[in-house]
Image (cartoon, coloured by chain):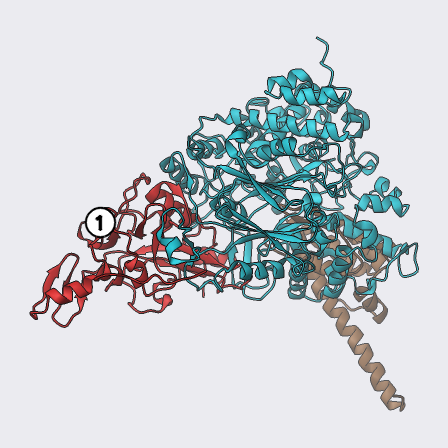
């Protein structure tokens, strides 16, 4: 039976034995792809699910694709999901996830695999060459120590890829005879191998270790670079000439065209200020002015509007979003012009890409380090000794030395390598977690920029899950409304209409219940917001992290490019399920996808439960309760739709408040009850798991005494 | 590993040259062989031009091309190829390689069976008739451009090439010179365009390049030079 | 007041200088989709860069507190009054940022001119007295 949308095979890499084992994807078909596939594979192949450090050899790391990868599904063709137990979180490194874009998932499928399961630990550094289902382990001793860009280029050479983009077809056959035999012909490609690799930060097993692909695609969260480093795995290279069957190619192409023609602003005569998620223009997400207009937008495979760039100036290629701003506040100390500001920032972005270092840790962490230095706590001869050239803070030289030290466990990097909150505790700086000097809000990771005291769904989703969610599903409300306020421009959509448009899409739990989006003080801990949080967890677990629709383009709840403002999400002509069905041949309803997300989310919770999770651990960093989100400190206002005393909808500022401990505990109780989890422990119950066809999972939890008790009726 | 596949047997040129030895012009298949040995075929009525400085290298055109023609997702089966190198600076990081519908198409000329032919019913597009293709790969070898603008379909043991979407059973719009082309339709940034004006017939890749960057591109902060 | 209003050398030095870490002023940046980035500035040159107009992001600053900071921590009440006036007159928050950015640019330029003139005068004076 044809598995439409799939390559059909999952690859297990037993690094200990340097052995490749194939598993039929059909066994895991019910999990969809991406995260669902990965969680199920982790459940089956990780033999000790009590581990809480991803560097444990028992850890299993999964790199998983989706049926939509390698297809022109808008902004879903090129994403890839990574899973496993993480590194450096606090108090526990959970089973967690990260994602990256580019060409890797596409090429992995063309090479014949839907996912890679990385197990064990190699006795010495290796890299893996995957070519049309042929898998070879190679010695990586001489690659160990190289940066991520050098490693990729060296591997291209070793694989025999064409020298440059002006080369011809690359024939995979070793001999003419092989090419002539239909049974052995390996085919040709013009493409380069897609390589996923670690740099020094991962090799040295630091929690900041990322997986990097091409110049700027990175799986940053979770410390998966350290996981690979601990397994002595430097890189995986994939290249293939295969084809993926698609159930209804015509429907797929039609839906893609509908997206472009109806939901995306017309690039010939665009609305530059449209309110939409999928419907924008290719516009790189730099945090600084681009250094030159000599550039292109650069996109992941299948993307409908690229968010990165390649320049003519020789730096900054493919970096986007946070990595282009990690050093920004520091650079302002020294830059004398906007041009200099931009160049140092983009060159600093190159530095973290090459070291494979997670720049997100600096989102709030850099301020904290600067604060410690300025307070006389950190520096040469200080309580926290550091020989870094702090007098050059803000220069490119300092950035390079800082990243080098942190990637090599040198200087303060020796302590930060195993987690920043752990370092704070070791340094006797727990007070900083209370007073807000160190804003690491969830699980030992930095606050993202959407404070949990204001943007509730972001905070709740993060602390009830395993990491800073980095999911902009609802966050785009803040972006559109706050920007319009800042410019004193009329709202493209008024508050009441906006929440009603969104609520139309929130099936099943919150459909046509706009009150779930009311983030006013009186509604913060309500059943309504709990339903929104549930929907968000389940939507993202399937559509965003399993089907691999890009976070920056989906969901598309509302869309001013469309006359009635109804976005593409869940629509009959270009909704997420339309693409899924066209590719796979399924008859999935939008709600079926949400339900599949609930199943995946429950399996994840079962894994966290085995790792030792209990509701008592599910708490924010102390500052979230003990300090207010100061108005005007980051921005003058944080606008969100809220109901006023008369029940009328308005856009209002939700800054200036904190999270109430009791209120949040009540919220957790509501959330757990709605999820069918034990409200005392937060563990899944048998009834809930069996309802999701996860009886075996319930058996496992019961065997170790960690099955939630059923709610009394 | 690269290797060269040598053509075997008699090419159509050899065949035609032999039969035209009387000194007359001989009409054969797609074209006319003149007495001086020149093989003349009617010009295509449509061409694809590309803007390599604009392309966002998303590969969507490749995916759409393979799907529209063969119903599967495959880069190797795409009639348009996008080559990119992440570690090279703009504008040399991306190359688009599309069939040029050459005026004097060597791929048509060398085909020993007439499979690679001029489709007079569809604007003289140079096409491969899969029924007639014997998989000799001579057309691929004859293409003077790098990479060759014809593809080898490993599974079906046939050559293939861009037909401006004349034969697109999986596209629900009319294709061809008088219809749409999947790659043009799907490109998010309009970096591929269809034209009826024949570009200059030189080996220079730039002759099929167009500047498709307009005021919108400028407004987005990117050069239109 | 105009940003080019005269100032003494000591004020000019304060305008171009940096206050202590304890006297720092919070300035954020709204950079979708990353979020609201927090940071601090310790002087007007940094502040001017932080307020730069840019199509992809917006500066985050509390204008009222900013004027007070310039007055009391930086020590330029004239500039502070100008900031208050410019921010108050602007029809939107973004235009307030642009107005203050331009104002600071001129103020910094004025200050640089004064400090350079003072240095030239000192140098000339040193030459006359034979000091090197």
The percent position of residue C39, horizontal first and vertical second, equals 76, 52
Question: Tag 1: Cα neighbours inside 10 Å, few (<14), some, or many (≥20)?
Answer: few
In the depicted structure, whether residue B24 falls above or below residue A13: below
Q: In the shown orientation, is residue A636 left or right of residue A472?
A: right
In the depicted structure, whether residue C56 falls above or below residue A536: below
In the depicted structure, whether residue A590 falls above or below residue C40: above
In the rendered image of this protein, which colour is used for chain A? Answer: cyan
The brown-tinted chain is C
Camera sees residue C38: no
**Quadrant in the picture for residue A400:** bottom right
Along the viewing direction, whichever of A272 and B196 lies nearer the viewer: B196
How many numbered callouts? 1
The percent position of residue A302, horizontal first and vertical second, equals 47, 46
Q: In the shown orientation, is residue A237 left or right of residue A448?
A: left
Camera sees residue A703: yes
Location of mark 1 (residue): B132
In the rendered image, the quadrant that contains the C terminus of chain B is bottom left
Along the viewing direction, whichever of A61 and B93 lies nearer the viewer: A61
């Amino acid at each position: 039976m044809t598995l439409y949308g799939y390559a059909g095979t999952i690859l297990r890499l037993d690094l200990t034995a340097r052995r490749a084992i194939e598993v039929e994807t059909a066994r895991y078909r019910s999990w969809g792809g991406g995260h669902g596939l990965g969680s199920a594979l982790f459940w089956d192949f990780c033999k000790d699910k009590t581990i809480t450090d991803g560097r444990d050899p028992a850890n299993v790391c999964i790199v998983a694709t989706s049926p939509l990868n390698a297809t022109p599904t808008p902004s879903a063709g090129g994403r890839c999901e990574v899973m496993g137990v993480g590194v450096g979180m606090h108090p526990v490194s959970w089973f967690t996830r990260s994602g990256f874009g580019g060409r890797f998932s596409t090429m992995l499928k063309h090479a014949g695999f839907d996912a890679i399961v990385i197990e064990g630990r190699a006795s010495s550094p290796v890299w893996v060459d995957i070519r049309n289902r042929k898998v070879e382990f190679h010695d990586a001793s001489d690659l160990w120590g190289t940066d991520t860009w050098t490693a990729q280029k060296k591997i291209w050479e070793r694989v025999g890829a064409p020298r440059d983009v002006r080369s011809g077809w690359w024939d995979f056959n070793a001999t003419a005879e092989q090419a002539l035999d239909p049974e052995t012909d390996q085919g040709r490609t013009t493409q380069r191998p897609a390589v996923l690799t670690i740099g020094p930060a991962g090799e040295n097993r630091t929690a900041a270790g990322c997986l990097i692909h091409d110049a700027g695609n990175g799986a940053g969260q979770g410390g998966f670079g350290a996981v690979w480093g601990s397994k002595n795995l430097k890189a995986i290279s994939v290249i293939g000439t295969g084809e993926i069957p698609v159930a209804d190619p015509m429907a797929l192409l039609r839906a893609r065209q509908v997206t472009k023609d109806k939901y995306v602003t017309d690039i010939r005569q665009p609305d530059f200020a449209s309110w939409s998620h999928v419907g924008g223009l290719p516009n790189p997400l730099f945090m600084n002015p681009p250094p030159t207009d000599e550039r292109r937008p650069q996109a992941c495979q299948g993307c409908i509007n690229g968010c990165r760039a390649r320049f003519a100036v020789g730096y900054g290629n493919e970096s986007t979003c946070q990595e282009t701003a990690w050093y920004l506040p520091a650079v302002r100390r020294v830059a004398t012009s906007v041009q200099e500001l931009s160049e140092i920032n983009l060159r600093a972005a190159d530095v973290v890409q090459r070291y494979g270092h997670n720049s997100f840790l600096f989102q709030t962490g850099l301020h904290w380090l600067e604060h410690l230095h300025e307070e006389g706590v950190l520096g040469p001869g200080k309580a926290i000794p550091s020989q870094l050239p702090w007098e050059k803070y803000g220069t490119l030289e300092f950035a390079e030395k800082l990243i080098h030290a942190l990637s090599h466990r040198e200087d303060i990097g020796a302590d930060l390598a195993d987690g920043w909150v752990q370092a704070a505790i070791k340094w006797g700086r727990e007070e900083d977690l209370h007073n807000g000097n160190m804003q690491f809000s969830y699980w030992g990771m930095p606050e993202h920029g959407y404070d949990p005291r204001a943007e509730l769904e972001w905070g709740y989703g993060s602390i009830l899950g395993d990491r800073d969610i980095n999911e902009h599903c609802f966050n785009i409300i803040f972006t559109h409304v706050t920007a319009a306020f800042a410019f004193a421009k009329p709202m493209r959509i008024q508050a009441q209409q906006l929440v009603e448009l969104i609520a139309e899409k929130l099936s099943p739990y919150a459909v046509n219940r706009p009150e779930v989006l009311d983030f006013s003080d009186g509604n913060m801990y309500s059943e309504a917001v709990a339903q929104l949080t549930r929907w968000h967890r389940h939507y993202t677990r399937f559509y965003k992290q399993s089907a691999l629709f890009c976070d920056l383009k989906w969901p598309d709840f509302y869309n001013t490019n469309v006359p009635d403002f109804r976005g593409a999400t869940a629509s009959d002509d270009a909704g997420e399920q339309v693409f899924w069905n066209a590719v796979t041949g399924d008859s999935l309803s939008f709600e079926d996808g949400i339900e599949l997300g609930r199943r995946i989310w429950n399996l994840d919770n079962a894994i966290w439960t085995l790792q030792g999770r209990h509701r008592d651990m599910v708490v924010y960093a102390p500052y979230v309760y003990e300090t207010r989100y100061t108005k005007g400190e980051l921005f003058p206002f944080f606008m969100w739709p809220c109901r006023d005393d008369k029940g009328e909808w308005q856009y209002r500022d939700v800054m200036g408040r904190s999270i109430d401990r009791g209120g949040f505990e009540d919220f957790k109780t509501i959330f757990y009850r709605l999820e069918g989890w034990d409200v005392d422990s937060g563990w899944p119950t048998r009834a809930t798991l069996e309802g999701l066809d996860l009886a075996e999972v319930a058996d496992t939890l019961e065997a170790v005494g960690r099955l939630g008790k059923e709610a009394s009726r | 590993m690269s290797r060269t596949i040598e053509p075997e047997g008699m090419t159509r040129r050899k065949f035609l040259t032999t039969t035209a030895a009387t000194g007359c012009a001989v009409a054969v298949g797609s074209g006319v062989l003149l007495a001086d040995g020149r093989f003349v075929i009617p010009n295509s009525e449509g061409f694809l031009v590309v803007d390599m400085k604009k392309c966002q290298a998303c590969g969507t055109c490749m995916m759409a091309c393979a799907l529209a023609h063969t119903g599967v997702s495959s880069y190797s089966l795409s009639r348009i190829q996008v080559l990119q190198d992440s570690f090279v600076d703009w504008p040399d990081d991306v190359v688009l390689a599309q069939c040029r519908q050459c005026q004097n198409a060597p791929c048509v000329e060398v085909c020993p069976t007439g499979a690679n032919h001029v489709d007079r019913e569809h604007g003289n597009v140079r096409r491969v008739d899969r029924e007639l293709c014997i998989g000799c790969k001579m057309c691929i070898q004859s293409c003077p451009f790098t990479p060759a603008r014809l593809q080898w379909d490993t599974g079906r043991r046939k050559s293939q090439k861009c037909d401006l979407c004349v034969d697109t059973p999986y596209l629900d719009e009319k294709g061809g010179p008088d219809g749409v082309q999947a790659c043009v339709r799907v490109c998010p940034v309009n970096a591929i365009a269809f034209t009826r004006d024949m570009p200059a017939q030189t080996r220079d890749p730039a002759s099929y390049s167009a500047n498709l960057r307009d005021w919108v591109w400028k407004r987005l902060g990117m050069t239109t030079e | 007041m105009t940003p080019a209003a005269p100032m003494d050398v000591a004020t000019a030095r304060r305008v171009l200088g940096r206050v202590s870490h304890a006297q720092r002023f919070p300035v954020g940046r709204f950079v979708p989709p990353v979020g609201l980035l927090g940071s601090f500035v310790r002087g007007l040159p940094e502040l001017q860069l932080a307020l730069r107009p840019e199509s992809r992001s917006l500066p985050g600053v509390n204008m009222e507190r900013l004027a007070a900071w310039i007055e009391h921590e930086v020590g330029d009440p004239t500039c502070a009054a100008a900031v208050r006036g410019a921010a108050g007159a602007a029809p939107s928050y973004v235009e307030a940022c642009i107005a203050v950015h331009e104002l600071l640019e001129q103020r910094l330029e004025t200050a640089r001119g004064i400090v350079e003139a003072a240095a030239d005068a000192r140098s000339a004076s040193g030459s006359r007295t034979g000091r090197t």
